[in-house]
Amino acid sequence: MAFGDFFEKQRPAEPTYSSGNGLQKDVAFFQELKGRIHRRLIERIDLGKLELFSSVDLKREIGFIIESLIMEEAVPLNQAEKEQLIVEVQHEAFGLGPLEPLLAEPGISDILINNYNHVYVERNGKLHKSDVVFRDNAHLMQIIERIVSKVGRRIDESSPYVDARLADGSRVNAIIPPLALDGPVLSIRRFGVDPLKIKDLVAFGALDERMMVVLEAAVKTRLNILISGGTGTGKTTMLNVLTEYIPDNERIISIEDSAELQLKQEHVVRLETRPANIEGKGEVSQRDLVRNALRMRPDRIVLGEVRGGEALDMLQAMNTGHDGSISTIHANTTRDAMARLDTMVLMAGMDLPERAIREQIASAINLIIQLVRFSDGTRKVVKISEITGMEGSIIVMQDIFVYEQRGVGKDGKIIGDFKATGIRPRFAQRFKVSGYELPPNTFDN
């Protein structure tokens, strides 16, 4: 088939324009020209036949078509401006428009779009305003709809906010008017194409080697682990890192609101929640999925984040033979994490005594990893704590490792040290009987 088959009948050329001051100096004109060429490209090609061509041939030939449309516009462009325009029109037609160059930059961890002309990115833990802009809020809305439709979600006035994901697993949240007063808002939390490993976290200063050895042994000996931290502290990254140590011969079931985990094992079942439809029916919650997962013969359950009534089902699973389960929770301290779990169990609608809930927590969870994001943008494990039981109605914890901040350097960098508290945890005996001999000075302060 020839590429001429893409063309419908030739349309009369639209009026031409001249920028006068040069294209790069007039962003509004550039956006207008790009939008016009994009519309004419869509009019000229048969979208139904695109899948018949290889990506290389498609990109080359579409580039030729765009170049001919630019020539018809008779706008004075130098070669660099013409190449930039071709690339951006291709992004509009087959990608996510202005987001594509940001998504291609590995150093960006967050993309925050407040409206069409206010785009911020996070590099190395610091926010910077980007030069990227959208044509208008309608253009931004088109990109949002393109993202959410690919994962079977919807966003409109009746459902004005949504969680979704990109093809690479990056987390997406969008909220639109009337809830967002100044136009559509899009937030993207990115994850690397190559997931970080725990040795990378050691190299970045997120934890030290003694902590790394203990966490590896904790996963392999099937301790139940809860990862706690505030927003943006790296909980999902830590969860990904720890799942690397789960043996390949175990059946893993992951449950998430929006699938983000990048599990590398062969025997993995990935489950994702489903929001209600336009009639308010058909919702499948995390609690529904946790209950169903228990019937699927899991060796381990990995819960992306516990945030509601599923806390009760997760604790019961941990207490009934599903050792080695891992989850995350939003909390600023390990003690806050226990209080939040307490509250979320009550959200399940069960009228349980406070002491009974806390006994469930104390017997289910072995280890809590507390993460903090510091003022310089670095993320660190500030505590690894063991839950040892109950004293009266209080859950008893003991810190095994801590991070002690000593100050802030002249360059704004946090100064501190990872230290063992000198307490030998109860699970050390479990490591030993499971065949994991730790270095003798692992828990020495």
Image (tube, rainbow, N blue to C red):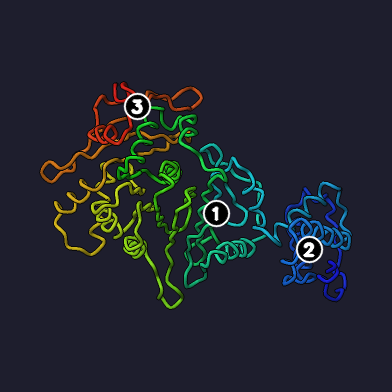
Q: Position of residue 48 (x, y in %)?
A: 72, 72
For label 3, the residue is: 404
Image quarter of the N terminus = bottom right
Q: Are marks 1 and 2 in contact (CB under 8 Å)?
A: no
Count residues near mark 3 (Cα–Cα under 10 Å), then give few for <14, some for 14-19, many for 20+. few
Q: Position of residue 173 (x, y in %)?
A: 50, 57
Q: Which residue is nearer to you in this view: 183 or 385?
A: 385
Residue 233 in view in this figure: no
For label 2, the residue is: 37
Callout in the foreground (1, 2): 2
Name of the residue lying farthest toward the left: 392
Residue at image coords 50%, 60%: 164
Of mark 2 and mark 3, the one earlier in the sequence is 2
Of mark 1 and mark 2, the one earlier in the sequence is 2
For label 1, the residue is: 114
Image quarter of the C terminus = top left
Residue at image coords 78%, 66%: 41
- Look at the numbered disc 3 and give the secondary structure of its residue: strand
